[in-house]
Image (spheres, coloured by chain):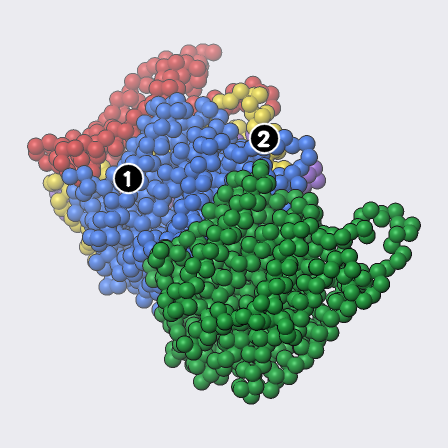
Amino acid sequence: MGAAAIGIARQRNLFGVVLLSGIYSFLMATLLVVLDAVDVAMTEAAVGAGISTVLLLGAIHLTGGTESKPIHKPWLPLFVVVVTGGMLVYGTLGLPAFSDPQAPIHQHVAPSYLNEGPVKTGVPNVVTAVLASYRGFDTLGETTVVFTAGIGVIALLRRRRPRQKFDDRDDGREGGK
Amino acid sequence: MRLDVILRVLAKLLIPFAVMFASYVQFHGDFGPGGGFQAGVIIAAAVIFYGLIYGLPSAREVVPDVLVEAMIAIGVLVYAGVGIAGLLLGGNYLDYFVLDHDPVHGQHRGIFWVEAGVAITVSAVMLKIFYVFAGRRRDAGGEGS
Amino acid sequence: MTFAGHYAYFVTILLLMVGLFIVIARSNLIKKLIGLGLFQTAVYLLYISPGKLIGGVAPIVGEGFEVYSNPLPHVLILTAIVVGVATLALGLALVVRIKEAYGSIEEEEILGLDADDELKSRDRS
Amino acid sequence: MLSQHLPILLVVVPLLAAPIIVLLRRSFPSWLVATLASIATLAIALPLLARAVSEGVISYAIGNWPPPLGIEYRVDAANAFVAFIVSLIGVFVMPYCRRGVSSEVRAEEHYLFYAMMMLCLSGLLGILLTGDAFNLFVFLEISSLATYVLIAMGRDRRALVASYQYLLMGTIGATLYVIGIGLLYLQTGTLNLADLAVRLPAMGDPRATLAALAFITVGISLKIALFPLHLWLPNAYAYSPSAVSAFLAATATKVSIYVLMRYFFTIFGETVVFDARYTGVILLALSLAAMFIPAVVAIFQTDVKRLLAYSSVSQIGYITLGISLHSVGGLTAAVAHLFNHALTKGGMFLVLGGVVFRLGGSALDRMAGLGRTMPIASFAFVIGGLSLIGIPGTAGFVSKWYLVTAAMAEGQWWLAGAVMLSSLLAVIYVWRFVEVAYFREPPAGHPPAGEAPLSLLLPALAMIVACVWFGLDASWSGNMARAAAEALAGGWK
Amino acid sequence: MSGSMALAGILATPLVGLVLVSLSGRWPNLREGITLSTAVVLFAQVLGLYGAVADGARPELVLLPMLPEVSLQLTAEPLGMLFGLIASGLWIISSIYSIGYMRGNQEGNQTRFFVCFAGAIFAAQGIAFAGNMLTLFLFYEAMTLITYPLVTHHGTDHAKKSARIYLGVLMGTSIVFLLTGMLATWVLAGTLDFREGGILAGQVGATGTAVLMALYMFGIGKAALMPFHRWLPAAMVAPTPVSALLHAVAVVKAGVFSVVKVVVYVFGTENLMSLGSADWVPMIAGYTIVAASIVALRADNLKRRLAYSTVSQLSYVTLAATLLAPISIVGAAMHIAVHAVGKITLFFAAGSIYTAAHKTEVSQLDGIGRKMPWTMLAFGVGALSMIGLPPAAGFISKWYILSAAMSAEHWTAVAVLVVSTLLNAGYFLPIVWRAFFREPPASDHHGDAHGHDHHDDHGEAPWPMVLAQTVTASLTIILFIYHEPVLKLARAVAGGD
């Protein structure tokens, strides 16, 4: 997975990049299954390897396929990235170790979901119970995000007649005066 | 051309299965992995598949733009409406317990409608994005720019 | 899954750094978005992996199972994935429009074009 | 019966309005629904604020699940006041959109525009009221996505690039925020903010807590456009449609500032954030830099919209300066300035929108002789400018009063001088407009433009009048700011 | 009519006038009629309050609860009464004068001019009757802003540049120093009300008081203490009535009035005396007096000379106020009134000369007294008052200040007063002498293509201007003989009642 990620960073052919990111998502989904997150894995597979790839390919088709060589030396981004990573390493050192049943996340809140969730909601898949009921408002928000994105894409890419498009560009010049 | 025919036939056969699979994912979400979002994606994928094979215009005929846009909105309305129903029946917002005399039934009912709302919006949005992106290419070509 | 301790975190962090690097350092607008996606997926692991309990199973309650992995991170990440793809769709739509307006999707070139515009309009006025 | 559901209704009303607008599709009905919805939010926000001030914390369990399990809305004087500000601005901006948008967005896209406005409003209100860390992220994304689209609807092609850059920055910010709350969650096992505030001191490891603090602060600061993370803001404000600039300038950054204050004072607590750490010092230094550097940049702008945008970055410095004092006085100043600056900047952008409507652009050179051709608009704009400077009798003075007295009460006398000096910079950039508008001849050949249509002028004037009113009688807004500050500092116990 | 109602009326009248004037811009006669009648009504109202205040009443009016802790409020007390009377009284006269001037010179933007004029008077009344420091500050800033368009009146590059200096210095000092000082006072004393004995008494140590003193003294830029005096000469680009009423009376007097008010009611004279924190102020003031006089001596432009004379005369007030002897406060208050009347006369005369003869430089004034006897006579009276010679009122105030300096045994101040009197004589008397005893230049009529522009065949200025300057000149002399009402108020300020 790491190799795929670095490959994405280095590859300049965008088709290659998209392909790699699809592979990456697939690997991610596999890993998620291993981690018992079946719902997430299913979604990641559908979204990461499916929708995203299709979307990216569509976009590349509309915009062209290769990336030009970067002009700047990447020192500043590198610095930012290293600081971010360093901060995270520092932070995670303070967290409970992997698969520690005594970790707070397994002690607080989650047991209630697992114990009473299926009883109170009648839904054995606790993920669904939490998603749709306990944290149903989050999911409403999520749906709204999808809605927003959908409407947004319509607003941005609505079909317009060529003449209007010309006007648009002209307006762009106008505004800069 | 022959390949085309095979594809068309395949598509005709596959699409009902896809829709069935989607509804399985939708309703089985209570017991196994899956739910509204995944179901929505699959439904959208079925139509997109249809569009890829029969061409965008025929897909647009089957599922017209206006309907898709309306569905985008309706999904959210269904979801938020469940919440309002909770309010009207004397509970808090998104309170499913009050949707039926039996709280557990109420929960079931609530989750069902909520997931339906998600599926409607997600499938419609995915479809719409496909329409828009695919349609864009044609327009861009038509303008000769 | 025998590696214990904080190994899982470090993998996450590495992915996250690569993603962030692509976003900041690369000039191609689409590649930036892909980097952004990478950056986000890394975060998914940060949430999911601590939720796993060795010996546990997916949080679908059934008979015969005692230990379940924590369902809450799964829920959160489901939402996060959806948000991520929504952002990606919107970002790509913007890139398509930018390509049409500028004829390029390289950040450097676009900023250069804008600077030219600025100069021209200043000369005119 | 309805009164107990006020918190959720405040968010759901605009959220429902959006899909309804999409179904309506026509320009006028969409506008009507949007306007009515924004009036409704104000009608909800006012009694909610009154209740929050008199009763203290109001908790609302969504789905009737008890708080740490389900998502909770938690309202106190602080977020109720900011929610009031946001919905108030909404009520000013929505009537303005009818005419203001017509020249900048094509008619068949109007309903999309209004839907986006509603989503943005709903998202912002959701961020404010929620008592759940992750739910906050979801609504942050709703408002952000809507914002990106709204910005991209600007006429200039640079609006697209501005929107794209904001999308990158905003998503990075939001993701950093998610990392931060992830770290908090892994330490405590809860996402409920009030629960976090209780459990964090007991269970948190200092390293992870510090990292979480860093990620949340940086993530939110990106949205705040805290110097030097402000690079997305000037373009985004400058190229978006005027009504959007006004709405965003008055609300979006303010909401993020509220989030920062909430995390600093209620969740982490002052001991974690300020004592024995450099957070206060860093924030102070950045605030000072923000007060001066963007203000100087603003002086050299040739476009009035960009000038105002840079001025916004500079004014945000005042607010964060108030936070960095970590006292109730400082917080009061921050909240007061949040309110006053929202009125001022929103009003100025609206006035400017009217001017752009007539002149077709916002370049400073075009405004020559504006004092004669559009006397009311230019006068209103100057009043807004005086408020930016902080002339007594305008809202801006009230904030300055609070800010400087808070700094002095903390013994930071030199800060008072810094604030005064930076407001001199504001004098300079405001006066560039005054000289051009009043003492330069209108460019020859241009037809004399009259005042903007009433539907644009009235909302703008209303905001400027409010800005003067709250400058002359700040007893209400001052008391509210004080109550909000006490609520923030007092926590959610 | 109760006192607080009267205060409301005083504040509302110029505001109403302002609105009416701006609405009647299309009919100049109506507009000027409104200006005049507003001025008269205002003066009558202020005068109506005189009796009560002189008898010790202190009517109050809370306008708006500006902040939760401090409200905007008005209080009539003797010093404010004095300033209010001067500003409103002289507004009548200078309105008459302005009408003549603006029409005589065919100035543009006359409506804006009269609107801003009314606004400035509004601000002056607000300053005069401010019940606390916040209110005073509000109207102080309002005055700066409302007079800005008057300074830029001509809209030329030179005017814009000067207006930038004007605004820059006044705004800069008031924001950076005065506002800081005021907020510090609020933090330290917990109140901003003007109170006898001073609100800072017993709250702050000697060093703190000295710092605050500096913030106030330099913050009140309108008092033109050096080095923040540059705005005053810069403001001379404005039309002369503006210079006359605003930059000889309303604006600058607002400055020194604030100085006296702050010294008496914020710091408290006794408090300052015991702390010794204000000892340095008379030095700066003395320096300003002498330095400005020397600049005036060398200025050829008449208005510039008058401006520097104003800078110098203002510092008399500051000097007197900070000598801290009871009698010196009387001198300061008296000097505010006396200098106002005298200086406005001088500016009126300068404007008359410009209108009638289009002359602006001192060196052009040879023999002009023969053509414009009334004008130059008035000028002479004003000059005497500036120097402090009887029978002009300047003598009275200077006498009080001098005796205060003597009684305080402040020999530097005494020396400054003596030297400055000589300097005053040195730059005023030659003008009078030139005007009456020198021959007019003979060469003017020959070979001058623009002879018409030079107005050499001029007579007196238009009658409204002559009338105005005659009235103020007479007032200068009357005040010398009968100054009891003014003295009564001044004594009340000093707490000697």
For image coordinates 68% across by 39% down, the residue present is C125
Q: In screen coordinates, is C114 left or right of A99?
A: right
Residue E354 sits in which quadrant?
A: bottom right
- Give the chain coloured purple: C
Label 1 sits on a secondary structure element that is helix
Determine if residue E76 is in view: yes
- Give the chain coloured blue: D
- Give the chain coloured red: B
Q: Which residue is mark 2?
A: A171
- Give the chain coloured green: E
**Chain at tag 1:** D
Q: Are marks 1 and 2 on the same chain?
A: no
Query: Can you say which quadrant of the picture contains the N terminus of chain D?
Result: top left
Taking depth in this image into account, of E181 and A149 the one nearest to the observer is E181
Q: Which residue is mark 1?
A: D43
Taking depth in this image into account, of D412 and E84 the one nearest to the observer is E84
On the image, the x and y values in percent for residue D193 come to 26, 53
Question: With respect to residue E469, does E280 lie above or below?
Answer: below
On the image, the x and y values in percent for residue C104 come to 59, 35
- Give the chain coloured yellow: A
Query: Can you say which quadrant of the picture contains the C terminus of chain D?
Result: bottom left
On the image, the x and y values in percent for residue D353 come to 50, 37
Label 2 sits on a secondary structure element that is helix
Taking depth in this image into account, of D166 and A78 the one nearest to the observer is D166
**Chain at tag 2:** A
Amino acid at circle 1: Ala
